[in-house]
Image (spheres, grey):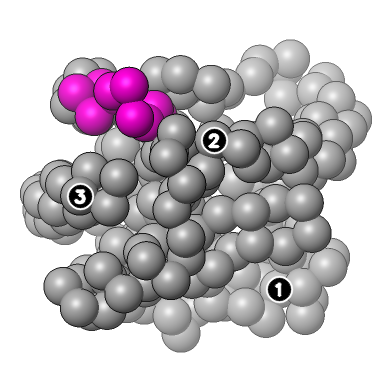
Amino acid sequence: MLEEIEQLIKFIRIEYEKLTNSWEHSNYYERINLKNTQVYEVIENKLILDTIIKYREFINENNIDLMIDFKKFNSDNATVNVRTKAKNSIEFKIKNYIDNHENGKVPINKCFNDLFGIRIICNTDISFDEIFNLIDTKYNNLKCIDSSKKEYKATHVYFKKDNYSYQWELQIWNKKDENNNIKSHEKYKQDYVKWENENKEKRGGNNDNTFYIHE
């Protein structure tokens, strides 16, 4: 299982570097230091939010090719899926950070470390220590954290070029934790759905849903 995860990490690195380079040479790109810029500044500077949304749109333009490429990692041993964060979810996350996380005095890159996410669900259990040792030995430029909290059990790996580039997130789950992890996500989504419904009329009733290969 560790070998399959390593192959997936290699592939993500290549795709991340390729798309980040394309993003930086696109008409969408604005050079913003995402470590020094904080979430609350989005309210004061429309350019920041516009750039986040444009990055999401840029990823979506390439999503069909990405979905096809990531599909090849599905096997009897694991399931891989991808998603781009929904526009409404981006706006809700900004509000949530301003209301509940130090009044939004948190770096943009910490808040939006998952605008594009990949998830691998492993049928054979793999521990955080095994993944961390792999990252530490072969990919020490990547960030690997144990994101387990309460019923949610997962290892997250983050891909980042520099402080001016958005991160991608790889979630690594064990199959035995899948149901509890989904329930944990659903608890967060309950607040999001409530907020979205309250603002539905203002948004003309349009929803902008994420897309997974498998869910």
10 Å neighbourhood of mark 1: few (<14), some, or many (≥20)? many
In the rendered structure, the answer to whether residue 197 lies left or right of residue 214 reads right
Please name the residue that numbered disc 1 is placed on: 104
* Residue 190 as seen in the image, left or right of residue 163: right
Q: Residue extending furthest top?
A: 205
Q: Taking 128 as reference, is 103 above or below it? A: below
* Amino acid carrying mark 2 in the image: Lys
The magenta stretch spans residue 73: yes
Q: Position of residue 112 (x, y in %)?
A: 51, 59
Under mark 1, the amino acid is: Gly
Q: Which residues are magenta?
A: 71-81
**Mark 1 and 3 residues: CB-CB less than 8 Å, in contact?**
no
Q: Out of 96 and 78, give the one closest to the viewer.
A: 78
Question: Where does label 2 land, which residue?
Answer: 175
Residue occupying image coordinates x 47% and y 47% = 125
The residue beneath circle 3 is 3
